[in-house]
Structure formats: C-alpha cells, structure tokens
Amino acid sequence: MRYAFLLLVLAGCASADVSKMSDLDLCYTARVDEDHKDKAMAEVNRRRLDCQKYSAEVQKMWETEQRAGGTGGEMTPKDATKTGAKGY
C-alpha cells in the first residue's frame, strides 16, 4: 500500500503536467526532478506556494523513493549527520 502512493507520485512527476499536481507533489517535483524543475518552480511561483511547510513530507517521500530504488534526483537531507548519511 505504501508503494502504491509512491507510484502515484512518480506517475505525477513523469507526466509533468504541473498544473494538475497537488501542492505537495509540485513541491516535491520542484525539489527533486531535474527534468521538470523549471516548470514546477514556475507553477510554485504562480500558485504562490510556500514549499517549506511541506519540507518534512517531501523529505519522507524522497527517502521512501531511495529505499524503493527510485532515481529521484540528488537531494541532500538537511540533517545528514543525524540520518547517518555520508556526503560522498
């Protein structure tokens, strides 16, 4: 069930129809998807979104995608030392 949500998010990112994305998915796309980052950021600005309020959810989505073997871009966790991540 957890992966069903992830697949829906990835499908939303793959389509890149940013005007139909939820605010959370849009902020995620703007932060991680290098191919559609510009379109997503333009939509974030158009909607006047504050993606900071979604930062915890975006981080959780990214970590879930990484564990599932996704390629969701190069996002560095804010507290890399707390999560055990190493900057290579």
Image (cartoon, rainbow, N blue to C red):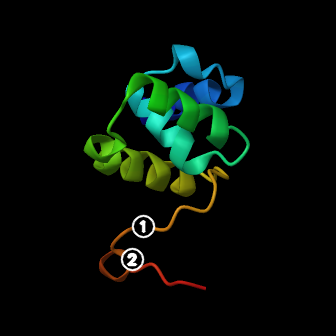
Residue 63's disc is none
Is residue 31 among the parts visible in the rendering? yes
> Taking 8 as reference, is 36 above or below it?
below
Secondary structure at badge 2 equals: helix
Amino acid on which disc 2 is placed: Ala
Within the image, what quadrant is residue 88 found in? bottom right
| Residue beneath the point at 33% across and 74% down | 79
| Residue beneath the point at 49% across and 84% down | 86
Callout 2 touching callout 1 (CB < 8 Å): yes
Residue 65, x across and y down, in percent: 54, 49
Within the image, what quadrant is residue 47 found in? top left
Q: As drawn, which residue projects farthest toward the right?
A: 35
Residue at mark 2 to residue at mark 1: CA–CA distance? 5 Å
| Residue beneath the point at 59% across and 25% down | 12
Residue 80's disc is 2
Secondary structure at badge 1 equals: loop
Residue 62, x across and y down, in percent: 48, 51
> Taking 37 as reference, is 78 above or below it?
below
| Residue beneath the point at 49% across and 68% down | 76
Lateral position of residue 52 relative to residue 69, left or right: left
Mark 2 surroundings: few (<14), some (14-19) or many (≥20) residues within 10 A = few
Task: Say which of 3 and 62 sits in front.
Answer: 62
Task: Say which of 1 and 75 sits in front.
Answer: 75
Q: As drawn, which residue projects farthest toward the top?
A: 20
Residue 63, x across and y down, in percent: 45, 56
Quadrant containing the N terminus in the rendered view: top left
Lateral position of residue 69 relative to residue 2, left or right: right
Mark 1 surroundings: few (<14), some (14-19) or many (≥20) residues within 10 A = some
Q: Which residue is mark 1?
A: 77
